[in-house]
Amino acid sequence: MSRVPLPYSQKILELFRNPKNLGRMEDATVSAVAGNPACGDMITFYLKINDQDVIEKATFESYGCAANIATSSIVTEKVKGMKLEDAWKITWKEIAEEVGGLPAVKMHCGILAVGALKRAIREYYSKKGTLPTWLSPELTFEEKQALEEEELARILSKRLKTTEGT
Amino acid sequence: MNGSVRELLKAHEGLKHEVYLDIENSSMVPKEVVDVMLSYFNQKAYGNPTLTHKPGWEAFEAIMESAREIATFIGCKSLEEINFTPGETEANNLALLGSASHLKDRGREIVISEIEPLSVMHVAEMLGRHGFSVKKIPVDNEGFINLERLKEAVSRETVLVSLSSVNHEIGTIQPIKEAVEIVKDKNPQAIFHTDACDAYGKIPFNVQDLGVDLATISSYKILGPRGVGVLYVKEGVKVDRILEGQIGTQKLWPGVENTPLIVGFAKASELAFKNFKENVERMRALRDRLIDGTLTKISHTVLNGPGGEKRAPDNVNISFLGCEGEALTIELSLNGVYVSSGSACTRRVLQPSHVLVAIGRKYEEAHGSILMKVTRYHTNADIDYVLDVLPGAVERLRKIAGSMGVG
């Protein structure tokens, strides 16, 4: 069991120790999950959105590593007070930069955090029944990656179960 | 210094107590061992042991004396059976590749288990890509190899069987003597190798009693220096070299011998065997204090591997459900407790330990696993400190997971 101690940035360490906007939001307008326990990464985002389509409050829960917790925390801080249209433009690269860079094996944590955010925004409009013109029906890069990661974990756990019997 | 590493280290300032339990991956070397080694760097025996001058003859004698000591501890017939290598990984590579190379015309089948260390597993898989067929014997939910399946797997074509004496992750003590009998009964010519790194100095281990042909032991797992190990090769058994170069006193490993490390390994062995029974009893008591304390104090925890006499005296491996292992190792480190986790992040998903998967743990159970090994140098106060820190660390991470966790 050799583990590489990844050189986490100061920002990641700080947010891992003191995550912002942590916890389930009882009066959330919408919530979304990305990842699953088999991936070893799972995030839930809760957004409180007002009738001007502005995010008033964002919180998260994370079952994941330090990078996962830190990127989730930073996304919730960043989107607070943002119009959904602007929040939609956030990319995982921006988030990775804002936490002071992510080691290669942790890039997917940033992708997953932004994936969960975009899922929540899409869910909000699909519940409303109107898609704004800026929201493409096609999945964004982060949503696709989140889906792929979940699918990969499903395949791996399935393969696990089938090899057990042989 | 890398800026982020500096920050990480700074975050550890002012710790009241520190407990190092990551013996699986590296160890602290006791002062007695370091002191002995130091003199061999610059005061004596710093010569090349195959050359004809005083520092060389001193080195030759130091290496032979170390080999003789280790040979006694594992019950060799002669010190010629001791081959120093730069560690466990190298000795296991030598055992598998060297046997396969020597015996490839006799047969092309290799048998290992599903829970071997990566230096056996990956080497066997590599041989699998070069024309060998590799059979992996399954284990039960405590990690014991299925002897029936072993019997079925061995054939006339089998050239090598490699099974660890004690599992490195979950401490399962395997019935190696029975396994050797089963293998030799079906194919007396098959070579039996055992990685005994977690047996040496921890449980009674004697190569002649067990009847093994090859055995790997390593220095750092008994608190010797890193960078040195031994492959025991039974008299009459042939293994090809896997590296070429200038051959000195070690016919299976070319290059100039590292005398201080070899001497350090022998000294560490001497200390481990000096009060063997007491050392083992001490480790076992610390192990059970840690296991029982953790399972009692923290809910949703699972012990991986067997308990009691069937488990290595130093091994503790526990899954904390609703916690991700890597986050937990960092959280514990910030509190002065140094351990390792069973899962490693790959580019896309977290890769669970193959050992935990083989004993039937679910992914989420494997992801939250923590491996700890106690030594005779640990105290009850150390274990109690760990037991003070663990519940808070687990609780904080479970709180972050919130409704997705175990409450």
Image (cartoon, coloured by chain):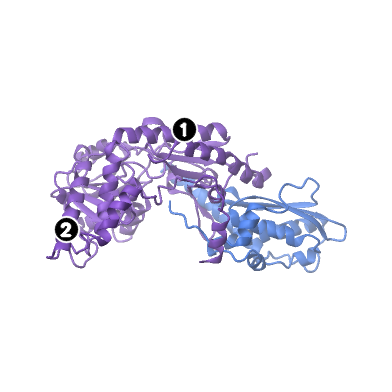
Chain colours: A blue, B purple
In the displayed structure image, the side of residue A130 where residue B44 appears, left or right: left
First along the sequence among labels 2 and 1: 2
Q: Secondary structure at mark 2?
A: helix
Q: Secondary structure at mark 1?
A: helix
Marks 2, 1: nearer the viewer: 2
In the displayed structure image, the side of residue B198 where residue B361 appears, left or right: right
Q: Residue at x 24, y 60 (%)?
A: B43
Q: Residue at x 21, y 68 (%)?
A: B245
Residue A71: percent from the left, percent from the top? 65, 59
Q: Amino acid at mark 2?
A: Glu
- The relative height of residue A163 versus residue B227 in the rendered view (above or below) is above
Question: Which of B151/B145 is in front?
Answer: B145
Q: Alpha-carbon neighbours of circle 1 within 10 Å: few (<14), some, or many (≥20)?
A: some
Disc 2 marks which residue?
Answer: B58
Q: Are marks 2 and 1 on the same chain?
A: yes
- The relative height of residue B333 versus residue B148 in the rendered view (above or below) is below
